[in-house]
Image: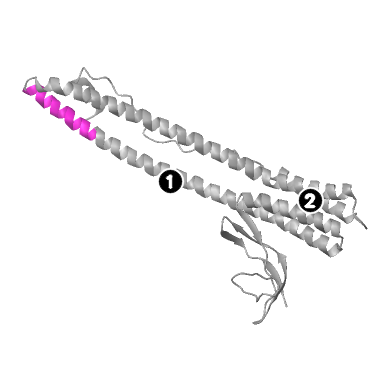
Amino acid sequence: MSEESKTESTPASKPRKTGSGKLKPLPLPVSVPKWPFLAADIIFIGLGYWISTLIQGEPQSWQIISVLVCAGLGAGFAVAPFYFEYRAEAKAVEIAQLTTVAREVNKMEDTAKLITEASANWSAVQETSEQTAKLAEEIASGMAATVKDHDSFLANARTEELNTLKLQVEKLRRTEADWANTLVGMLDLVYQLEQSAISSGKEQFIQTIGKFQGHCRDIARRVGLVAFEAENGTPFNVEEHALPDGESAGDNAAITRTRLPGFKLQGKLVRKPLVAVS
């Protein structure tokens, strides 16, 4: 039975407010342009490298501080756009979820009002004539159809909302992967900077860069990204170690040094350590 026929046959009942019957998709997050941040990152890293090339003899305090400041600013500019996008997407998902919950609560309140009004009218219908009894049967049939349609709508709404949430989770995972790769690249630069300091043989410079690398890794560890190196002298294992493109290892090859560290993100392997073998 249609909504118009039920309204005309039951004067005591009030017209029901109807909605569009569809959930709006979640709003798209604001896309943060990354090229200005990456350009600033490259500028600061290049500036730090240029300053490091000016060091001859015992490094001066301003030179060490300049290199560290350039590296820190470069890392900040590299991570900033992904952080801003993550905040924007999280805010968009939160607002969309609150809107969906409020809409569903309003629909449940309308349904509860309809059921209450039908229950109040049912006692009066029982005291009327056969014509009123037939009318009551029609109302009951209409209510059953309305409840069935409402249940079907809720099922479809839940499915649509679940698909939308899955899409948002996939986007967040891709953002997390991009962010992790960027942070891995920054830690690789810091590791290479430490190796250059070790090659220079300057103890103070080595200690300073070593502390700086330790601080960078501690910051990365707070978000679940852990760096690890291969142990020198251990046998090469293709399941645990990696070689540069074009190089291969023999059956009895042993690791002589770690070229680039490996990384794990929240216990999941992101990259194997890049090693050199004898």
Q: Element at badge 1?
A: helix
Compared with 161, 138 (above or below) is above
Residue stretch rendered in magenta on the structure: 130-145
Observer able to see residue 19: no
> From what the image shows, is residue 28 above or below residue 118?
below
Asked if residue 273 lies left or right of residue 123, the reply is right
Which quadrant is home to the N terminus? top left
Which tag is nearer the camera, tag 1 or tag 2?
2
Residue depicted at x 51% and y 38%: 93
Residue 107 sits in quarter = top left
Q: Is residue 26 left or right of residue 84?
A: left
Q: Quadrant of residue 192?
A: bottom right
Pointer 2 local density, CA inside 10 Å: few below 14, some 14–19, many at least 20: many
* Most common secondary structure along the magenta stretch: helix
**Which residue: 37% across, 28% down?**
106
Residue 227 shown in magenta:
no
Q: Is residue 129 left or right of residue 58?
A: left
Extreme top residue here? 12
Residue 35: x and y, percent? 70, 45
* The furthest residue to the left: 130
Which residue was labeled with disc 2?
45
Residue 100's x, y, as percent?
Answer: 43, 34
Secondary structure beneath label 2: helix
Mark 1 → mark 2, Cα distance in angstroms: 42 Å
Say whether residue 133 is magenta: yes
**Residue behind mark 1:** 163
- Who's the residue at 37% across and 41% down the image? 158
Where the C terminus falls, by quadrant? bottom right
